[in-house]
């Protein structure tokens, strides 16, 4: 929970940042557009104070490149979604901002496949109230702050803010947020990352999958002045380092990490400060794969002059690299080796931390199986509380150099010991082995100091200033040990939850920004099987709302409510074989949002028929493109047959069979409609059109069903005539479904031969007749033969017959007799 904060970021001009949205409303022009091209046009002419709104919908239209666009301190340029979370940028759509300043990107949902937002040499950019849920297929940095590649000493990035966003479901390497800089040595400076929700980063990679990475080895000697505060991390298991700091003079404070395998890591750089964080293992067991075992961890550091103060660490399972506090040996001295090395820890101050109920405690001097040999030096351990009931509260893998212990209180219980290293002894003024008399706060769910917790006078000459505790309460000259100072002041900082961060959380005491009307849905798309079903959608809003649908097969409960609620959407069973789609509309004040409901059709039955050959009237097979006809049979929706203009592709089933329906995949079928006809043939020469003026749905790139009503055929032909975007045909797959039962030729002939007109006064025509039929005879209904003659063509003269009903019989060598009734008028 986040309660109250003043004077939070003294290094940033937060007042100006916080007034951005208000300023944008106070001046400039507000324009709403409904295409990416229109948005780009508006960006080209935008002026300070303008607000550009992209309407509710989904957009897949490539990169939005913004260069040299400049708002001002009091009149930023705002690029925003019409409603938070209801405008989705997918596919290749992304923002690239180069040498721009004072812009706000607000309220979008990103489901694209590459970097969502990239800043190149830009400053005072605010990325706020967005949801990042990228559909990545390769290593991707989701939000990236850097420089301009060919301007390594100019056009520097600085004073950017990433706040109130959700980052979720990362599967590939790369980071949720990467802060680099210009060239190899100058990091972006004074950036602020606050009130974001980071979750579901996994599975584990050996490297380069941190949720946040600040700096990198080659720029580790530069000062970032980055502040990471009031963020909530859960199930961030992608990398041994959840937050990785690789530069100097950064602050990581008041964040909450829970159920995550990894640490806050000061991997490179000096003079960084880790303060007031809550780190919970959450009783999550370690996980194991072929590469190793991974556990929840605390804080790990390298380098010089760091401060680790007022942190609360509970329930951690890790050890060695991932202990609650990890001080390994280094493999190099600062300034004497490659910047990618693990520099010796020197002059770190580790004070007023609480470690409680962890499997292990403080681990010192692990040498990576003999690879490291530089022990921590001149480290101060002061006023910490460590309790535990297993293993060692302090494990010395190797002895440190000149470590100073001041008034720590440690309490091993159960099978735990203070340390198993008999060479390490402590006076009571260094470590008091005693019960610290902490008490569990049922409301805040943490162990806190009490009136009976030992107190000491803070030695500021040893640890510097320590004016407040983990909750933001004043820490006096005499204070209880551990992260919590016992006094009666109001609490300002508590462990965060998901409700305290993300796109719909507001913190006016932090940044002056008050709650605005919002209507956010946990999803905008639901999919159901063919049977009746139900699913829920979480509605987050501060308004009264209603839900409605015009689709009779969809029902909603409730149809209205006040503020946030759970909406249940139910469907009846789908009686048709076709997939169907409907819409649920949410309305709240001036805001609206939609949920697309898709339901599978019932199983049409049948089996997939074998195709022995495929031919096409044209195909796009060139040196750099292989969009040939065979691609429709390879089972791969990423390949296709392509042709320009009205062209056809024909499948040969080998023998006549009963064809019930087709499954066809259309290129870019989820973003455009394709035009086609379907024709069938028994002999590959004479085709009968069975689907005329066909059009794909335009809503899916998966296979679509085309019903043919159980037709007999050996050849299936699709005739394409372009799509809603161009004159090209693009078919990814074709499947023919029916019964694998060869139809005897005579059965087909018996059904296919027709005689007309009926009645007739002179000539009758015979349709479907083959040359194998050579004779005919006309019989009365009692069987008497009236006429017998040879067939000369496909017509017969019946003008000499009396009025009435007669039987016409057609015969030929080795052919079944065909009988049809005719009527003479």
Image (cartoon, rainbow, N blue to C red):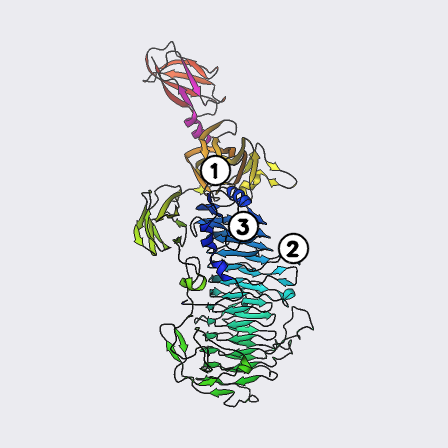
Residue interval drawn in magenta: 740-769
Residue to which mark 3 is pinned: 94
Please report whichever mark, 2 or 3, sits nearer to the chain's N-terminal start.
Answer: 3
Mark 2 near mark 3, Cβ–Cβ under 8 Å?
no
Q: Nearer the viewer, mark 2 or mark 1?
A: 2
Tag shown at residue 149: 2
Residue 312 point in image, percent of width and height? 46, 75
Residue 712 point in image, percent of width and height? 44, 33
Residue to which mark 1 is pinned: 673
Q: Nearer the viewer, mark 3 or mark 1?
A: 3
Tag shown at residue 59: none
Q: Residue furthest right?
A: 336
Q: Give left or right: position of 590 versus 725.
A: left
Residue 288 point in image, percent of width and height? 51, 68
* The N terminus: image quadrant: bottom left
SS at badge 3: strand
Please report whichever mark, 3 or 1, sits nearer to the chain's N-terminal start.
Answer: 3
Q: Distance of mark 2 from mark 1, alpha carbons? A: 41 Å
Mark count: 3
Please report whichever mark, 2 or 1, sits nearer to the chain's N-terminal start.
Answer: 2
- Asked whether 204 or 525 is in front, the reply is 525
- Residue 206 on the magenta span: no
- Asked whether 135 or 352 is in front, the reply is 352
Is the residue marked by circle 2 packed among few (<14), some (14-19), or many (20+) residues within 10 Å?
A: few
SS at badge 2: loop
- Asked whether 251 or 277 is in front, the reply is 251
Q: Distance of mark 2 from mark 3, alpha carbons? A: 19 Å
């Amino acid at each position: 929970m986040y309660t109250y904060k003043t004077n939070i970021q003294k290094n940033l001009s937060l007042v100006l940042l916080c007034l951005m949205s208000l300023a944008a409303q106070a001046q400039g022009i507000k324009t709403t557009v409904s295409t990416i091209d229109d948005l780009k046009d508006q960006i080209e002419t935008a002026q300070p104070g303008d607000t550009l709104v992209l309407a509710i919908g989904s957009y897949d239209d490539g990169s939005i490149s913004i260069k040299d666009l400049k708002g001002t301190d009091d009149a930023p340029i705002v690029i925003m979604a019409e409603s938070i979370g209801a405008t989705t940028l997918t596919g290749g759509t992304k923002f690239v901002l180069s040498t721009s300043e004072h812009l706000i990107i607000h309220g979008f949902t990103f489901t694209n496949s590459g970097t969502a937002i990239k800043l190149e040499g830009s400053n005072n950019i605010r990325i706020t109230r967005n949801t990042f849920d990228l559909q990545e297929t390769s290593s991707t940095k989701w939000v990236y702050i850097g420089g301009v590649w060919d301007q390594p000493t100019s056009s520097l990035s600085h004073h950017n803010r990433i706040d109130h966003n959700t980052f979720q479901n990362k599967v590939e390497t790369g980071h949720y947020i990467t802060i680099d800089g210009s060239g190899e040595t100058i990091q972006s400076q004074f950036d602020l990352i606050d009130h974001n929700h980071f979750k579901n980063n996994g599975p584990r990679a050996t490297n380069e999958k941190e949720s946040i990475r600040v700096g990198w080895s080659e720029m580790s000697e530069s000062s970032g002045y980055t502040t990471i505060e009031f963020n909530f991390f859960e199930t961030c298991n992608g990398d041994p380092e959840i937050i990785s700091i690789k530069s100097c003079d950064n602050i990581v404070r008041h964040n909450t990490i829970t159920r995550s395998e990894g640490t806050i890591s000061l991997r490179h750089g000096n003079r960084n400060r880790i303060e007031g964080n809550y780190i919970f293992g959450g009783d999550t067991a370690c996980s194991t794969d072929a590469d190793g075992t991974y556990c929840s961890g605390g804080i790990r550091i390298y380098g010089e002059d760091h401060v680790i103060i007022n942190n609360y660490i509970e329930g951690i399972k890790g050890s060695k690299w991932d202990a609650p506090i990890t001080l390994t040996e280094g493999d190099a001295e600062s300034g004497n080796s490659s910047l990618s090395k693990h520099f010796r820890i020197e002059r770190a101050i580790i004070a007023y931390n609480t470690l409680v109920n962890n499997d292990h405690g403080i681990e010192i001097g692990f040498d990576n199986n003999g690879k490291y040999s530089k022990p921590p030096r001149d480290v101060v351990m002061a006023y910490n509380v460590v309790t535990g009931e297993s293993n060692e509260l302090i494990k010395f893998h190797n002895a440190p150099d000149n470590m100073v212990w001041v008034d720590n209180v440690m309490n091993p219980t159960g099978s735990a010991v203070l340390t198993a290293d008999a060479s390490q002894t402590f006076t009571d003024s260094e470590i008091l082995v005693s019960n610290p008399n902490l008490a569990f706060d049922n409301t805040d769910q943490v162990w806190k100091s009490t009136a009976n917790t030992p107190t000491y006078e803070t030695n500021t000459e040893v640890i510097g200033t320590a004016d407040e505790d983990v909750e933001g309460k004043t820490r006096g000259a005499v204070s209880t040990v551990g992260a919590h100072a016992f006094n009666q002041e109001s609490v300002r900082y508590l462990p965060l939850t998901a409700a305290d961060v993300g796109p719909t959380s507001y913190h006016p005491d932090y940044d002056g920004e008050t709650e605005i009307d919002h209507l956010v849905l946990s999803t905008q798309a639901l999919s159901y099987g063919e049977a009746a079903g139900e699913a829920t959608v979480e509605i987050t809003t501060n308004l009264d709302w209603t839900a409605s649908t015009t689709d009779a097969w969809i029902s909603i409960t409730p149809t209205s409510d006040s503020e946030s609620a759970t909406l249940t959407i139910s469907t009846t069973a789908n009686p048709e074989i076709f997939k169907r789609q409907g819409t649920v509309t949410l309305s709240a004040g001036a805001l609206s949002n939609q949920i697309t409901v898709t339901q599978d059709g019932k199983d049409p039955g049948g089996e997939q028929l074998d195709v022995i050959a495929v031919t096409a009237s044209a195909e796009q097979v060139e040196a750099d493109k292989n969009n040939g006809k065979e691609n429709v049979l390879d089972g791969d929706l990423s390949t296709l047959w392509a042709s320009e203009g009205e062209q056809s592709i024909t499948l040969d089933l080998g023998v006549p069979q009963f064809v019930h329906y087709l499954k066809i995949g259309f290129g870019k079928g989820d973003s455009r409609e394709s035009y086609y006809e379907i024709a069938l043939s028994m002999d590959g020469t004479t085709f009968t059109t069975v689907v005329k003026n066909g059009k794909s749905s335009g809503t899916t790139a998966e296979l679509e069903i085309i019903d043919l009503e159980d037709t007999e055929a050996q050849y299936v032909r699709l005739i394409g005539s372009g799509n809603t975007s161009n004159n090209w045909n693009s078919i990814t797959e074709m499947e023919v479904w029916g019964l694998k039962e060869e139809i005897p030729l005579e059965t087909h002939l018996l059904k296919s031969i027709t005689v007309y007109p009926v009645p007739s006064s002179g000539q009758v025509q015979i349709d479907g007749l083959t040359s194998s039929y050579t004779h005919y005879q006309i019989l009365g209904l009692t069987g008497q033969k009236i006429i017998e003659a040879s067939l000369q063509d496909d017509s017969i003269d019946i003008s000499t017959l009396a009025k009435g009903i007669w039987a016409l019989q057609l015969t030929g060598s080795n052919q079944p007799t065909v009988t049809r009734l005719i009527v003479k008028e």
